[in-house]
Image (spheres, rainbow, N blue to C red):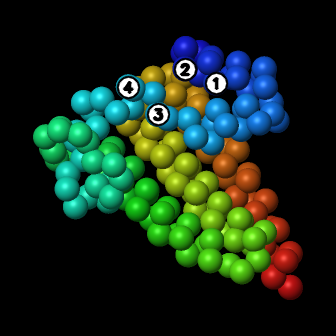
Amino acid sequence: MNPIHTLFAAALILVPGTALAQEKFDAAPLPAICTKAGTAGMTSGSPMSAMDPPAGGMAMPMDDAHKELAAGMARMRADMAVGMQAADPDIAFDCGMIPHHQGAILMARVELKYGKDPENRKLAEQIIKSQEHQVMMMLAWLEEHSK
């Protein structure tokens, strides 16, 4: 397990269910490696350009992996915005979370398609399995409550 995965796993074990754990994951900034030079590959006008643009980085064309990630992110954001408009907070939760989980599944599939790291590939497989199960649970709940 790489050091980042180990750190997050330890945090989950040491403080599960506490406010400290919630704060750690709700508002945690991205690690510095996530905001370094590699993010300069986002071009203006791409689906990812709506996110924080790279500071001072020269925009370059995106490769296929990043194009797939960007397209999935754009769809996820649009579908979440629609889903969360339901008046009932429970329904809004599920209708917003379904596309969120679908976005995670898509990202994991992109990792399996393009990624090389065995730990990340295993994590991607686990994400697909768990998120697909949770989507099915939410769809079933919505079906039950739409009657």
Q: Are marks 1 and 3 in contact (CB under 8 Å)?
A: no
Q: Position of residue 13 (x, y in %)?
A: 78, 22
Residue 40 is drawn in which quadrant?
A: top left
Q: Are marks 2 and 3 in contact (CB under 8 Å)?
A: no
Q: Earlier in the sequence, mark 4 or mark 1?
A: 1
Report the Cα–Cα distance between label 1 and label 3. 13 Å
Do callouts 4 and 3 mark residues in contact (Cβ within 8 Å)? Answer: no
Q: Which mark is residue 44?
A: none
Q: Which residue is mark 3?
A: 30
* Mark 3 Cα shell of 10 Å, populated few (<14), some (14-19), many (≥20): few
Mark 2 and mark 1: span between their CA atoms?
Answer: 6 Å
Q: Does 105 sit above or below residue 93?
A: above
- Residue at 46 percent of width and 33 percent of height: 30
Distance CA(mark 4)–CA(mark 3) = 8 Å
Q: Residue at x 70, y 58 (%)?
A: 135
Residue type pointed to by label 1:
Phe
| Mark-to-mark CA distance, 2 and 4 | 11 Å
Q: What's the residue type where badge 4 is placed?
A: Ile
Q: Quadrant of the N terminus?
A: top right
CB-based contact (under 8 Å), mark 2 and mark 4: no
Going by the numbered disc 2, the residue's amino acid type is Ile
Of labels 2 and 3, the one closer to you: 3
**Mark 4 secondary-structure assignment:** helix
Q: Is residue 96 visible?
A: yes
| Position in image of residue 85 (x %, y %) | 62, 77
Q: Residue at x 63, y 71 (%)?
A: 84
> Which disc, if any, is residue 33?
4
**Horizontal relation, residue 118 to residue 40: left or right:** right
> How many angstroms separate mark 2 from mark 3 (CA)?
11 Å
33 on left or right of 61:
right
